[in-house]
Amino acid sequence: MVKELSVSIMDHFLELDDPRMNRKKEHLLIDIVVITICAVICGADDWVSISQFGVAKQSWFKTFLKLPNGIASHDTFGRVFSLISPEKFQMCFRNWIQSIVSVFDDEVIALDGKTLRRSHDKGVGKSAIHMVSAWASENRVTLGQIKTEEKSNEITAIPELLKVLDIKGCIITIDAMGCQKTIAQQIIDQEGDYAFSLKGNHGNLLESVEKSFNKIEKQCYFENMNVDYYETKNVDHGRVEYRRHWITSEIDQIYKANEWKGLNSIGMVESERHVNGKITIERRYYISSLDNQAKRFAYAVRAHWGIENSVHWVLDVAFREDDSRTRKGYSAENLSVVRHIAANLLRNEKTAKIGVKNKRLLAGWDNEYLYSVLNGLT
């Protein structure tokens, strides 16, 4: 008996414009896209392995795809993905995610960038692609991503990504690079909250926040009603870490505080680590639109690291993204989107209690399991 494939993905990518305007089309665009998504889920990492996966699974694909001329060659897969508009491919991805995922109030949406290290092409003067992604911490999915422009950085890409996201009621976390007044204003205008980490790129602001907490500590105001506190302890394989969080709404002495729209508080996180008898202490500082609630602040700060651990690390280790030499046309950017689709589906498949890397192998071996992965977010 043939099961019905999740129509969610297919329906949304049917909206994609075919870029092969003046070519004879022996293979349907939706067939090429669906085979690529399935192949990447199952462990394929380049166009040759994607095409070979299609050949090996051709009888299975025929149960739900038309395949008028069989499986396309690896050259065809590569050429088509090098021509597909990345903006429209991203739009299909976002429409699919937004149709099946609802963000929660107070959900942390972490924004962070990652470079596709081997996507550069020195021969034509093309630098490596840098993608900024948005990670929804509770849903555990990537909501969207956008490429930074050549000779630009995340500061210009973040506002464009925020524009296409519904962030109402959410907490947006960004590292020091994205700590910008215009971005803070945009988040507030879109009815979200923010928590920005501070580093040397905002020297005067960082110094004023640090001085404020030093003064509070010196005068023993950490127990003051205007300073809220929350502590956590984590023990893992002999390593002990205490995280202490302070937040205060006393921002009168903060450098140009009035220029940051929605600024309500400043925060400090102290991490004390015990490893092999050695103790290290690190403090980090934040500005935020959040109210004076240390537990909520701690949740936002901690959830931000999910984009490193659950997105970037998975792409590097389970999908070997940094080893990919795909670089012709738009192929690197579009294949990055496919990896995020695959990672979203694999991460949210709950029946197999194994890591993403082994889930990819299992999906390649077992068509029944691949069905469950493809239907995992419906």
Image (cartoon, rainbow, N blue to C red):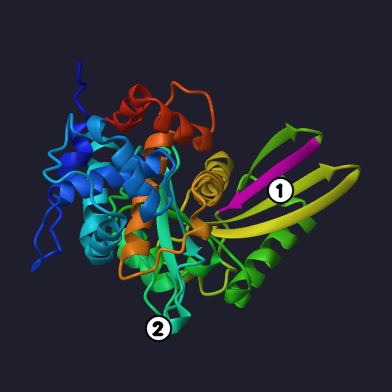
| 310 or 71, nearer to the observer | 71
Which marked residue is nearer to the observer: mark 2 or mark 1? Answer: 2
**In the rendered image, the vertical position of residue 151 relative to residue 87, given as above or below:** below
Give the secondary structure at mark 1: helix
- Which range of residues does the magenta coloring cover? 239-248
| 2 or 371, nearer to the observer | 2
Name the residue: 47% across, 63% down: 116
- Counting from the top left corner in percent of width and height, residue 228 is at 62, 44
Kindly identify which residue carries mark 1: 222
* Label 1 CA crowd tier, 10 Å (few <14, some 14–19, many 20+): some
Q: Residue furthest right?
A: 277
Query: On residue 124, which mark appears?
Result: 2
Query: Which quarter of the rendering shows the N terminus?
Result: top left
Residue 98 among those drawn in magenta: no
Query: On residue 372, which mark appears?
Result: none
Direction from residue 34 to residue 129 in the image, left or right: right
| 112 or 106, nearer to the observer | 112
* Label 2 CA crowd tier, 10 Å (few <14, some 14–19, many 20+): few
- Counting from the top left corner in percent of width and height, residue 54 is at 30, 42
Q: Amino acid at mark 2?
A: Val
Name the residue: 23% across, 66% down: 83
Give the secondary structure at mark 2: helix
- Counting from the top left corner in percent of width and height, residue 290 is at 47, 50
Name the residue: 19% across, 25% down: 4
Direction from residue 96 to residue 151 in the image, left or right: right
User: Is residue 247 in sight in this rendering?
Assistant: yes
Q: CA distance from mark 2 to mark 1?
A: 57 Å
Query: Which quarter of the rendering shows the C terminus?
Result: top left
Please tell me which of labels 2 and 1 falls first in the chain: 2
